[in-house]
Amino acid sequence: MEALAIAALLAFAAKLTDLAKFLRAKDWNASGTQIVTWAAGFGTLALGAASSVTEGIAIPGLGVPIGDLDIWSMILLGASGTSLFSVAYDFKKAIDNTDSANTPALFPDSNPG
């Protein structure tokens, strides 16, 4: 499990770097989408922590129930977990020449053409 945690943290660092690049390029769709993704990860963990449905569920590798996590742990786990999925999505997108998983932009296109 430690390898997964390290991979998630490295993915978070990579996505933080991507965010800086998106902001510098004034790509508001890409930067906004990344921020919304991190917020969704945190929000999902916070909702799970407050729910009785997840009382007995422990975070793999930590042995701590979701409800016992502090706010900073939820922020870090939410952001790094969604970053790991974002990196996997980027990889799939890079090898999928058909773009079969294409979804509409979350925000209006800020970089036309």
Image (cartoon, grey):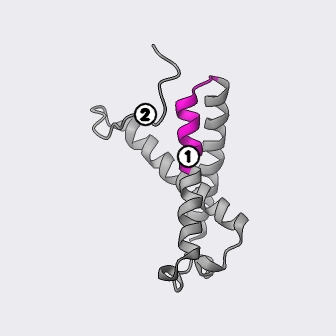
Mark closer to the chain start, 1 or 2: 1
Helix, strand or loop: magenta stretch: helix
Label 1: which secondary element:
helix
Amino acid at the residue labelled 2: Ala
Q: Position of residue 54 (x, y in %)?
A: 50, 80
* Residue that numbered label 2 is attached to: 105
Q: Residue at x 71, y 72 (%)?
A: 70
Amino acid at the residue labelled 1: Val
Q: Which residues are magenta?
A: 25-37
Q: Position of residue 61 (x, y in %)?
A: 59, 76
What's the mark number on residue 14? none
What's the mark number on residue 36? 1
Q: Farthest residue in the bottom direction?
A: 56
| Residue 23 seen in the figure | yes
Work out whether 86 lies above or below 9: above
Q: Residue at x 72, y 64 (%)?
A: 72
The foreground one among 80 and 70 is: 70
Q: Quadrant of residue 76?
A: bottom right
Q: Residues within 10 Å of mark 2 (few under 14, many from 20)?
A: few
